[in-house]
Amino acid sequence: MKVITSTIALISLMVFASFSHAETQYIRDEIRIEMHSGPTTGYRIVRYLKSGDILSVLSRSDDDKWLKISTKGKEGWVQARYATPTPIAKALLKKSELNAATLMQKNTALQNQLAEVVAELKSVKTLQSSLESSASSLKNKLGAIEKTASNAIVTAKNYQLLQEQTELLDVKLEKLEEENKILENDNLEDGIIWGILAVIAGVILTLTVPKMSTQKRKGEW
């Protein structure tokens, strides 16, 4: 029982090793190749392979004339003389064309990216120019504002001085008005006094003049 188990394990390892170390082969430049179910032409044909098909070699026949291969999801046997370890010119050309197409696509993508970068660069330069222009305009406006603010400060100081001078003038005017009122009162009092004096003088004259006239007449008699 142990011997059978060991044998099965050994076969499994060999099969696994054959799969893990499978080499790659290609069909030569032939029109059509038969893939058989066994390592002779007497076995039934599983399918036909065309030039350039890729084969995964699973094992070889004892005489090394047949290859057990796997391709396109099927396994079978093909004659080793129709296989080659290097790709044929047709496959290489197809691969080159695919690579060229891929490179063209990448080149187109890179050109598009370059165009986008150039456009973004132009946009950035335009934005930079606009920002520089805006900065210059803002600088000029700031200078005008500073000048206006300076003028406003000077104007405010002058206005404050004018207010102070106006207040002083108001005070002086009030004092002058008070002095004028005092003078008017003094003049009124003086006028009253002079009026009284004039009345008294008139009364005196009225009383003395007739007496003097009478005395003068008496003297003449």
Image (cartoon, rainbow, N blue to C red):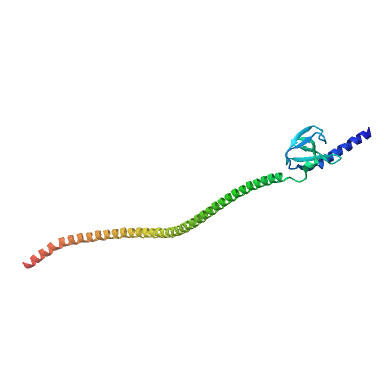
Taking depth in this image into account, of 102 and 95 the one nearest to the observer is 95
Across and down, in percent, residue 127 comes to 53, 52
**Residue at 42% from the left image edge and 59% from the top image edge:** 155
- Quadrant where the image shows the C terminus: bottom left
Q: Residue furthest left?
A: 221
Across and down, in percent, residue 41 comes to 81, 35
In the image, taking residue 9 as reference, residue 164 lies left or right, namely: left
Taking depth in this image into account, of 169 and 92 the one nearest to the observer is 92
> For residue 46, what is the image quadrant?
top right
The vertical placement of 3 against 187, above or below, is above
In the image, taking residue 102 as reference, residue 7 lies left or right, namely: right
> For residue 180, what is the image quadrant?
bottom left
- Quadrant where the image shows the N terminus: top right
Taking depth in this image into account, of 47 and 141 the one nearest to the observer is 47
In the image, taking residue 148 as reference, residue 52 lies left or right, namely: right
In the image, taking residue 198 as reference, residue 41 lies left or right, namely: right
Across and down, in percent, residue 54 comes to 75, 41
Taking depth in this image into account, of 16 and 36 the one nearest to the observer is 36
- Circle count: 0
Q: Residue furthest bottom?
A: 220
> For residue 77, what is the image quadrant?
top right
